[in-house]
């Protein structure tokens, strides 16, 4: 199914934390509210930290790992995610030693519908290796989410690093640019008349000269990234991918 038309693009992007001993249940729903980070991400020599420019968050959002950065790109590109923020709430819980500690779940994500989702981002290897240590934190985060009418999920590299992420990285710079109106006026009527095509065949139908075709490519990627043209974003986008006018299917 084309996730951008019927289901949240991250429908399968997480582990259901209601069954903490089993990390094989695919599930993911996203969510919503005004989001404000409650913790500043400190520099970290053990992992990649930094800031991600987010239009949906309306600011630079902090990340503490490459995996969190990848999830931010996925959320930014998703057409069903309305807003998100990193480390928006603080939760208190008892560690294995009984010490009272404070934890910061990684993401709170908002859809245009449905409840918010509180999300922790971890590599699966880390979950398995540090399970006893992490379990109290996960349980406390889930409890906090339920008390606020949210959903809680744990998300790993298996669910995040997909063809959708690759497409997000490639298309986001084009989607953020306004399509050239003259080039759009060439591409749109042609794809509408063809119904379905590939980027390669659409460009060939628009003009025979390779140099003129090359000039149309940035606008073509922009139209796909903006969802003006449709394609299956769960598959890696190439010049031979199937694209279609939205009303054609």
Image (cartoon, rainbow, N blue to C red):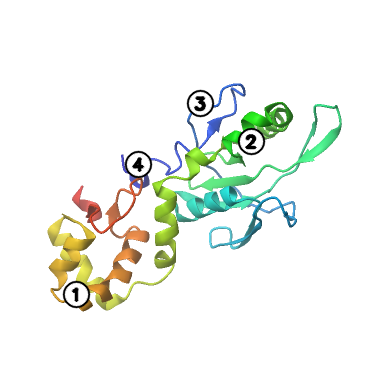
User: What number is the disc on residue 81?
Assistant: none
| 98 with respect to 113 (left or right) | right
29 or 34: nearer the viewer? 29
C-alpha separation, residue under disc 1 versus residue under disc 2 = 49 Å
Can the viewer see residue 211 in this picture?
A: yes
Q: Secondary structure at mark 4?
A: helix
Specify which label sits upstream in the sequence, 1 or 2: 2
Q: Residue at x 13, y 73 (%)?
A: 208
The mark lying in front, picked from 4 and 3, is: 3
The mark lying in front, picked from 1 and 3, is: 1
C-alpha separation, residue under disc 4 versus residue under disc 2 = 33 Å
Where is the N terminus found, in terms of image quarters?
top left
The mark lying in front, picked from 3 and 2, is: 2
Q: Quadrant of residue 130?
A: top right
User: What number is the disc on residue 126?
Assistant: 2
Would you name the residue on which mark 3 appears? 24
On the image, the x and y values in percent for residue 31 come to 54, 43
| 232 with respect to 115 (left or right) | left
The mark lying in front, picked from 1 and 4, is: 1
Specify which label sits upstream in the sequence, 4 or 2: 4
C-alpha separation, residue under disc 1 versus residue under disc 4 = 36 Å
Residue 141 against residue 74 in the figure, above or below: above
C-alpha separation, residue under disc 1 versus residue under disc 3 = 48 Å
Can the viewer see residue 226 in this picture?
A: no
User: What number is the disc on residue 210?
Assistant: 1
């Amino acid at each position: 199914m084309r996730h951008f038309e019927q289901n949240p693009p991250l429908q399968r992007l997480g582990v259901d934390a209601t069954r903490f001993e089993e990390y094989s249940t695919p599930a993911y729903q996203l969510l919503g509210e005004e989001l404000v980070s409650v913790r500043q991400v400190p520099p970290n020599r053990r992992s990649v930290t930094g800031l991600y420019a987010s239009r949906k968050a309306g600011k630079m959002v902090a990340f503490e790992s490459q995996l969190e950065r990848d999830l931010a790109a996925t959320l930014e590109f998703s057409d069903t995610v309305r807003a998100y923020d990193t480390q928006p709430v603080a939760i208190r819980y008892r560690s294995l030693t009984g010490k009272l500690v404070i934890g910061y779940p990684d993401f709170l994500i908002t859809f245009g519908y449905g409840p918010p989702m509180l999300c922790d981002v971890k590599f699966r290897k880390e979950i398995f290796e540090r399970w006893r240590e992490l379990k109290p934190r996960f349980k406390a985060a889930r409890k906090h989410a339920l008390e606020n009418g949210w959903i809680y999920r744990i998300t790993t590299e298996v669910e995040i690093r997909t063809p959708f992420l690759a497409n997000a990285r490639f298309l986001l710079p084009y989607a953020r640019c306004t399509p050239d109106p003259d080039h759009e006026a060439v591409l749109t009527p042609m794809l509408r008349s063809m119904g379905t095509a590939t980027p390669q065949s659409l460009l060939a139908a628009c003009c025979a000269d390779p140099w003129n075709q090359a000039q149309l490519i940035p606008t073509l990627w922009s139209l796909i990234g903006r969802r003006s043209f449709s394609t299956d974003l769960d598959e890696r986008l190439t010049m031979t991918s199937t694209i279609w006018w939205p009303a054609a299917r």
